[in-house]
Amino acid sequence: MITEHVRFAPSAPLQPEELDLLQRVFDVTCAEVGIEKKSLQAEGLAATLLKLFQSGMRDEKELTAAVAKIEFI
């Protein structure tokens, strides 16, 4: 799960629907790119998704497209 890889700031708790959105993008990206969910790449993906979300990117398609452009080593 995405929550295994990132710590959420106590001043900015995510709502359940927001966490669900991030989890969907995380799951789809892991499946499409072939990332093991308990890997360093997954940790990087989770952190990237959270940063994008916190910067204001809240649309699922936009988030998916943004992380699709990243090369995961």
Image (spheres, helix red, strand yellow):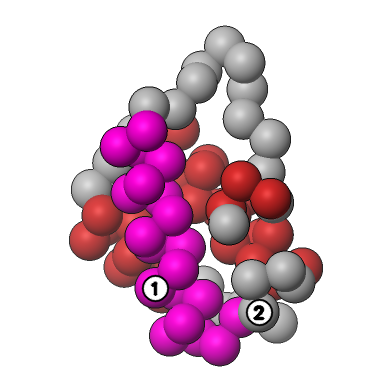
**Magenta span dominant secondary structure:** helix
**What label sits on residue 28 in the rendered view?**
1
Q: Residue at x 64, y 71 (%)?
A: 37
> Magenta stretch: residue 22 in it?
yes
Q: Residue at the right extreme?
A: 40
| Residue type at tag 1 | Val
> Magenta stretch: residue 19 in it?
yes
Q: Residue at x 51, y 76 (%)?
A: 30
**Secondary structure beneath disc 2?**
loop
Q: Residue at x 49, y 51 (%)?
A: 49
Q: Which residue is under mark 2?
A: 36
In x, y percent, where is residue 33?
50, 85
In x, y percent, where is residue 68?
41, 74
Q: Where on the picture, by quarter, is residue 45? A: bottom right
Res 54 seen here: yes
Tell me which segment is drawn in magenta.
16-35
Is the N terminus in the top left, top right, bottom left or bottom right quadrant?
Answer: bottom right
24 displayed left or right of 6? left
| Residue type at tag 2 | Glu
Mark earlier in primary sequence (2, 1): 1
Circle 2: is it few (<14), some (14-19), or many (20+) Cα within 10 Å?
few
Circle 1: is it few (<14), some (14-19), or many (20+) Cα within 10 Å?
few
48 displayed left or right of 14? right
Q: Where on the picture, by quarter, is residue 73? A: bottom right
